[in-house]
């Protein structure tokens, strides 16, 4: 499985640290073939990576599963015409406007929520259930793989990380 994660910035965020741990473990366990992190703003990365990090301008050559981590990144990723399965990592803390969230849903993008509360808020606003719940990106790759394998087409049972 080829995975890409699209973040706003590489500047020393806790989010990037969680992403690094998930991808590095998956590469070590050979559960993914390749991984890329795409970003809009460059910054200092205080740890070693086992995958490529590329400016978002290089996404034109990417194919696989792409997880956007903010409204800005998902909005840019929507315009990509490559062979990608686009997912959005939603959290109420992002303070996304309701109309923007509905725009994401209009594009039939699968949403993975950060917490159970986020999933409830998503359902309250849109009537759509989250594809899964992944606190700090835990089990995020399994959720996407489950979607690709057709195990999560019925969203009545939301996949939750343990």
Image: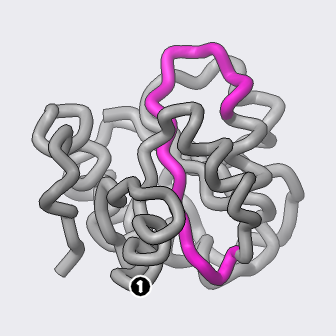
Q: In which quarter of the image is the C terminus?
A: bottom left
Q: Is residue 153 left or right of residue 116?
A: left
Numbered range of the magenta stretch: 78-94
- Judged from the image, the secondary structure of the residue bearing numbered disc 1 is helix
Q: Which residue is drawn at 30% across and 34% down?
A: 1
Question: How are the residues colored?
Answer: one colour
Q: Is residue 80 above or below residue 90?
A: above
The residue that appears at 31% across and 54% down in the rendered structure is 131
What residue is disc 1 on?
117
In the depicted view, which residue is nearer to us: 144 or 48?
A: 144
Nearest the eye: 142 or 29? 142
Task: Find residue 136 and report its image quarter.
Answer: bottom left
Quarter of image, res 44: bottom right
In the picture, measured across the screen, residue 162 lies left or right of residue 88, that is left
Residue 40 percent location from the top left of the image:
84, 50
The local crowd at label 1, few if under 14, some if 14 to 19, many if 20 or more residues have their Cα within 10 Å, is few
**Is residue 136 visible in the rendered structure shown here?**
no
Residue 56 within the magenta-colored segment of the rendering: no
Residue 9: x %, y % from top left: 80, 63
Q: What residue is rendered at 73% in x and 25% in y?
A: 79
Choose top left, top right, bottom left or bottom right for residue 7: bottom right
Residue 21 position in % (x across, y down) = 42, 72
Q: Does the magenta stretch include residue 82?
A: yes
Q: Tell me: residue 87, above or below residue 78.
A: below
* Res. 89 in view: yes
- Total numbered badges shown on the rendered structure: 1
Give how far across and how far down residue 160 sits, in percent.
21, 71
Q: Residue at the location (57% across, 32% down)?
A: 107
């Amino acid at each position: 499985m080829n995975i890409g994660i699209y973040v706003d910035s590489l500047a020393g965020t806790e989010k990037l640290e969680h992403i690094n741990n998930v991808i590095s473990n998956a590469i070590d366990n050979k559960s993914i073939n390749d991984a890329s992190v795409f970003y809009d703003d460059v910054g200092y990365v205080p740890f070693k990576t086992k995958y490529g990090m590329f400016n978002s301008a290089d996404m034109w050559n990417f194919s696989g599963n792409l997880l956007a981590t903010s409204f800005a990144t998902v909005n840019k990723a929507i315009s990509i015409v490559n062979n990608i399965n686009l997912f959005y990592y939603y959290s109420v803390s992002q303070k996304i406007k309701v109309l923007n969230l509905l725009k994401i849903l209009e594009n039939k993008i699968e949403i993975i929520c950060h917490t159970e509360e986020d999933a409830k808020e998503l359902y309250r606003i849109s009537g759509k259930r989250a594809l899964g719940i992944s606190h700090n990106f835990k089990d995020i790759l399994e959720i996407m793989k489950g979607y690709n394998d057709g195990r999560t087409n019925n969203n009545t049972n939301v996949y939750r990380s343990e």
